[in-house]
């Protein structure tokens, strides 16, 4: 059996998994990232140790894929910026691991890998051209064109969350304003709900513990009018952004992942409704708006998909 | 010498040209479209006659490219919708001409061909990934990815003019609102200027004859404050849209064509300024924002580029 390593390298934890060609996650492992050491050697040694643990006793491992929350120069296999694990910036991590482990290693941005994961193992199997968006603290994006990730000149393409949809709109964490993720992300919903609660509005959200997108959706589903307003407003903006993606990419599908996508039909029905209002009918009708299939292990599976695609490319298949 | 036919099939006129591989327009011809006949046979016969006139006495003609203001199903070489010349909708025009003339014939949307024209003969020669926008009565777009037009699932990709940039914004000719072209096109500028003049504002624009984008730019350049405001507002919105394209496509260049692009540095300096404010610095800095090289003959040259690329693809070069 051919196995592929997927590494989800986050600021707090490194999640590793071994995935078969048919998408079975056969072994997992997790260790702290040790980013707080601020020492490249410590972080890299720690990662290699975790990899050795994962690989111990396993046969048929063909390639390693790594996903990181940052900008990756794919041509040189180098992370160009990664605020959460700065010591790995401008380091040829893929080369290092390839020398150490003797199998192909590739690295890319985690949103791009999430799109690869859906393409190889998930909801994107039947498409060649689709856009994956991840709704979480921000809105990430991976663009699939002709069966592969489209990265653009510096592999930064798909920064969908920073598409400006409201001139002089809400400030965004990136320093710009009016960005899509300032209106449609979990963070945006939480801010909006928290603000409304602080204003003393009548809502069951005033009685929940920690505010989260899940809590807001849950209260909206139970019928709380204010929670529903927050959900509906976010979905309206999500619909605007999805309509823009449809106009620009004319994709076969927009696949929606990330934590918020757990909200299910309650979310998707609304995104579809608003996208249908804001997109040209003939382009909307040929685009499916569907949930991602990989959720909990999306990071590991996406990186394993990168490993698989890298191996197949090097073998010319 | 190899020659390629470029046909710019518009609602009023058919412009035809013979173009050499190195981009010389060696012969042109123009006839009325006869769209008002509302008869497919009359329009097609008329087109064939014009083609025979163009080709008469010429040798080395290798392929024919056609550009139309409408939606083209490239796979079947068929125009799917073209409001200005409806009798040609759902007609296999490329097949018909290929049988009649015995050389490869291809057809595509005029904005896609404009991008091909820049790629083969113009300002896009050195790029593989760029976005072409045409600023005229609307805002058209052609997306170049990896050295070819990206059309998406139904060849409708690149509808950049209908990217929504203002929720509940100005009505657009397409029936939606807040579309980019309702803010950045010549039509938008003319509406804005005409409205301000009608309000009795003090401006030299009140003394011009017919309002046009050229007139507005000319008066702005001469120092009229109100004309400058109209230009500056349009450029601000153009900057927003260009920044969005940069975030989504991370292109090597955004190439700007169409009548409005004649305004030169006065336009480009402003688009660049606003795009730099609204785009992530690292993505803005790797993207050139430049004028198209083909302007007057952009339609014919773009269609000739389609002919050239079609021939080379069929010959596998």
Image (cartoon, coloured by chain):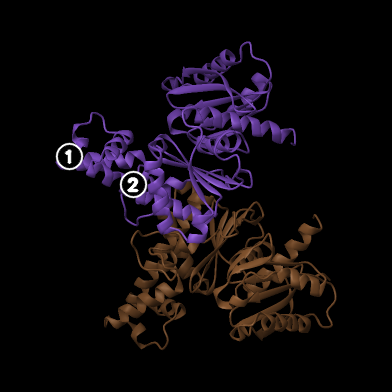
Chain colours: A brown, B purple
Residue A12 placement (x, y as % from top left): 59, 83
Residue sticking out furthest to the left: B200
Tally of marks: 2
Residue with the mark numbered 2: B234
The quadrant holding residue A231 is bottom left
Residue B35 placement (x, y as % from top left): 44, 23
Q: Residues within 10 Å of mark 1 (few under 14, many from 20)?
A: few
Of badges 2 and 1, the one in the foreground is 2
Inter-mark Cα distance, 2 to 1: 19 Å
Can you see residue B40? no
Residue A190 placement (x, y as % from top left): 40, 77
Chain under disc 1: B
Q: Secondary structure at mark 1?
A: helix
Q: Residues within 10 Å of mark 2 (few under 14, many from 20)?
A: many
Front position in the image: B309 or A88: A88
Q: In the image, what residue occupies the spot 67% across and 85% down?
A: A31
Can you see residue A59? yes
The quadrant holding residue A178 is bottom left
Kindly identify which numbered label has been placed on residue B198.
Answer: 1
**Sequence-first disc among 2 and 1:** 1
Looking at the image, residue A213 sits to the left or right of residue B146; the answer is left
Chain under disc 2: B
């Amino acid at each position: 059996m051919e196995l592929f390593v997927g590494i989800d390298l986050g600021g707090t934890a490194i999640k590793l998994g071994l995935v078969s060609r048919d998408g079975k996650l056969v072994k997992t492992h997790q260790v702290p990232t040790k980013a707080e050491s601020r020492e490249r050697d410590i972080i890299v040694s720690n990662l290699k140790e975790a990899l050795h643990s994962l690989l111990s006793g396993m046969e048929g491992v063909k390639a390693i894929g790594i996903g990181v929350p940052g900008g990756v120069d794919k041509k040189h296999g180098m992370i160009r910026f990664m605020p959460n694990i700065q010591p790995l910036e401008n380091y040829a991590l893929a080369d290092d691991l390839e020398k150490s482990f003797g199998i192909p290693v590739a690295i890319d941005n985690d949103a791009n890998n999430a799109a690869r994961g859906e393409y190889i193992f998930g909801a994107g199997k039947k498409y060649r051209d689709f856009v994956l968006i991840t709704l979480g603290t921000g809105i990430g994006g991976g663009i699939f064109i002709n069966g592969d990730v489209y990265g653009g000149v510096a592999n930064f393409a798909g920064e969908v969350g920073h598409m400006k949809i409201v001139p002089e709109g809400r400030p965004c964490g990136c320093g710009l304003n009016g960005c899509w993720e300032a209106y449609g992300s979990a963070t945006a919903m939480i801010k909006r709900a928290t603000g409304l609660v602080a204003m003393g509005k009548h809502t069951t959200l005033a009685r929940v513990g920690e505010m989260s997108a899940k809590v807001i959706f849950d209260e909206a589903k139970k019928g709380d009018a204010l929670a529903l307003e927050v959900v509906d407003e976010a979905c309206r903006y999500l619909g605007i952004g999805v309509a823009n993606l449809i106009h620009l990419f004319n994709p076969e599908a927009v696949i929606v992942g990330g934590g918020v996508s757990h909200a299910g039909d309650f979310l998707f029905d609304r995104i579809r409704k608003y996208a249908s209002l804001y997109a040209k009918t003939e382009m909307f009708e040929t685009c499916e708006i569907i949930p991602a299939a990989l959720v909990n292990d999306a990071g590991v599976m996406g990186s394993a998909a990168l490993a698989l695609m890298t191996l197949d490319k090097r073998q010319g298949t």
